[in-house]
Image (cartoon, grey):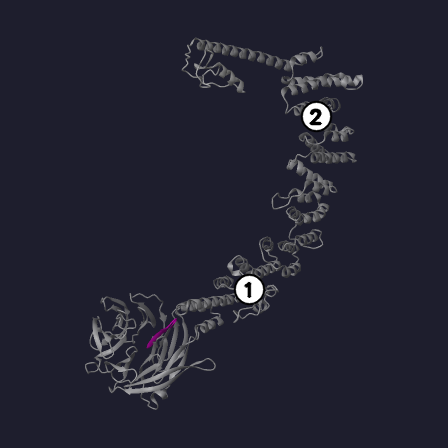
Amino acid sequence: MSVKAFELIPAVERDLLMGDKVRINIECIECCGKDLYVGTNDCFIHHFLLDELTSAKGRLTYSAQKLLHKYLGLKKPVAELRAASALERLIVLCDGVVFLVDMVTLENVPSSSGGGARIRGVTTFCVNENPVNGDPFCVEMGVLSLKRRTVQIYMVYEDRVQLVKEVSTPEQPCAVSLDGYFLCLALATQYMILNYHTEAAQDLFPYNSEERRPIVKRIAREEFLLAAPGGLGMFANAEGASQRAPVNWSESVIGAAVCFPYVVALDESFITIHSMLDQQLKQTLSFRDGRILQDFEGKVIVASTKAVYVMVPLPLERQIQDLLASHRVEEALVLTEGAQRNIPKEKFLVLYKRILQQAGFIQFGQLQFVEAKEHFRKGQLDVRELISLYPLLLPASSSFTRCHPPLHEFADLNHLAQGDQEKVLKCKKFLISYLTEVRSTEVVNGCREDVDTALLKLYAEQNHESLLDLLASENACLLTDCVPWLEKYHKYFALGLLYHCNGQDSAALQMWIRVADSELQDSTRPDLFEYIVDFLSSAADLALVWKYANWALHKNPTTAVHIFTKRPVSKAQPDLDPGDVITYLEKHREALRLYLEHLVLKKRIEEEQYHTHLADLYLERVLALLSESPTNEEQLNKSREKLQALLGESNLYRVQYLLGKMESCELLLQECVILYGKLEDHDKALHILVHKLRDFQSAEAFCIWTSSCRDSAYRQKLFHLLLGMYLDKSATGKSQSAACNDSGDLEMAAVDLLNRHGELFDPVHVLRTLPEGWSLQLLRPFLGRAIRASMHASRTSQIALGLAHSEHLQLLHDKLKETKKPIAVSAKKGCHLCHNTFNDTQVVCLPGGVPVHAHCVAQRVRDSPTKRQLTNSSNHT
């Protein structure tokens, strides 16, 4: 693909060079700074001064001024010219002779010995542009002789030449280039690299010099360009390797040069320019009668037989922009990256970032979003450049203006899509993904508000699931810009979140309440009411809680009470006073009950007023259900279970108060039993259970429950009381016939009680209490258990008595042993307790034979609240 990399500018026209002489042709050229030297076939050297001129339109031109021409007198063409500017000399090859002429006067330079500084029998020569000799006033030169298979190395001085090295070659060389110690040679049949210092040689590849003219061109330090078979331009380094891919030029190339990053080649009809970076042909210029193509210090000069031209490279940025204008993104990037070594680092970074950004927009316009995103990322694109393509996404308050010159050719997204809505949708999805990725990076520093606002608008417009995630996280969305946008797309829940993000919780709640009341339609959160309740439960502003809790309680008190029950406890968040909450909830009895349950049953607050209040509410509910007709038995049973559970578990409510409210209700006898139990009025409680409710199983359970935390004597007393209740026929208060029927039931209940819990009774007391006419067979389980228990107790007592007797005998034995032992007491011994010596015979002997003062032992016993444990094995004193 073509690109305009060079312009061919005339430098020396034919008329200025040879006038009307038809047979004069250019044979060689040399350029040093502004000085241009031309050698012709009539043995003349022409000296021109080249000046660069810039036209009003910015076009570069050259003006040539002829300073001098000189006939060399050999009647042969001037074959080669090389300038040695440090010596102010031209090295000339003419008629097989190399000699020196003055660069200014073009006169032959005489040698110091009086003869010309000449080398004869030369076919070609080259100058070492990477000299190994440190003398700045000396030029190194490689020379090929006419009949020798050798390469000669000469040192050229101001007025003489000196041979310093001669190296043999396997074939007659026909072209040479020199870099340091390395010679790159074109032999008759092949190319080779030769180190003239070590004479080490490296063959490169075959080449027939008789078929085509060989080209050996030094292009960089220890790197050469060669004309290879098959129309290839090959690169080779000093080691004989190729680190660049070859370029495919013409089979008939007669000259080549490198102007990085391009290889310029000349054949009979054209000048071709190939890229060294991708090896592609970039430009072709028509050029007939081409004879010479050479580069001089980065300036490429081409000559026909009659005129001289300069190939002026277009500015790199212009070349890159031309490639981008043709949408050749990869070529533009390759060219930019390849030119890095020729551009200062800071300038290159600025250029490279801009090219990447332009490339990104080109690929964006082609919907190549993956590549575009990568180029935007590498080019550190100001993301607002991309956002500005989308109408109305940037906030109205944004101060952003697009880059100048512009990075792309699009006015906006509509211009890019040309009415294709599918393309618009794809571009919007890309922007969403790109902004989502970069919003947490340094790319958005300084423009976070613009990015987040644009992202919110896109989310709302596209009904994107990440809209709520954006608002739930830290963001910089601008309220004034986003409110109309969210209202437009009916995102009222998201609008409430936006108000909350901006510290306007009251406005957020008002918006959500309008949605919950179906005043506004938004299906984002089906559980919006529960969300509002959770929001209020965690709100730090208590005034806000009191203001909106009433609305929630009227809508759903069961859920709304979570405002108060699920409020987190933390130092940073003020807590609500339970008393204030209870007062606030008085009008909402269901919510009040749930809140009191939270305080009493969950938080276990031990406050009499809360326990009593909750029990009172339970009782009110039960009484209300009892008064209904028909009665809902299921609800009534559940409510009574709650009331009974609270009455049984809690010890903090006012018993007399509740008892006074339910004593008049004959249907709440079970609850009265619990309350009498709390008052320890067990007679009344058992009377109700036995004679009114006839619930003998509950009577036994009552005795167990009431005595659960008391000693066995208390429990025995309760069971005896229950037994007495069963056996008391006068307590029924019924007629004689009914009493007879009941007495049978009570007697059977008494028998069952004794047989099930016989171990809790005093058998002797029971036998005295039972009626005379009872059959012993009925009481067989009870009596059997009682006899076994009595025998067990008797035998256990006998064992304990035997053990005590044995221990007593052991103590007597120990006492006798201690009594028979002599105890030595003298005035020299001291008391073990006070450490004073003995002065009388009032001595007490401790176990182990330790004598102490009698008063010391008495004092120790008085002072110690417990027995002193001594060190003897029997632990007895």
Residue 101 lies left or right of residue 718; in this view the side is left
Is 5 drawn above or below residue 745 in the view shown?
below
The one of 512 and 350 positioned closer to us in this rendering? 350
Q: CA distance from mark 1 to mark 2?
A: 79 Å
Residue at image coords 58%, 13% = 793
User: What is the total number of numbered labels drawn onto the structure image?
Assistant: 2
Contact, CB < 8 Å: mark 1 with mark 2?
A: no
Q: Amino acid at mark 2?
A: Gly
The one of 343 and 234 positioned closer to us in this rendering? 343
Q: Which residue is mark 1?
A: 384
Region rendered in magenta: 252-262
The one of 717 and 607 positioned closer to us in this rendering? 607
Residue 861, image x and y in percent? 52, 17
Residue 585 lies left or right of residue 872; in this view the side is right
Q: Quadrant of residue 703?
A: top right
Residue 319, image x and y in percent? 45, 73
Magenta stretch containing residue 260, yes or no?
yes
In this orientation, does residue 453 appear? Answer: yes
Magenta stretch containing residue 672, yes or no?
no
Residue 699 lies left or right of residue 454; in this view the side is right
Q: Quadrant of residue 577?
A: top right
Q: Which residue is mark 2?
A: 677
The quarter of the image holding the N terminus is bottom left
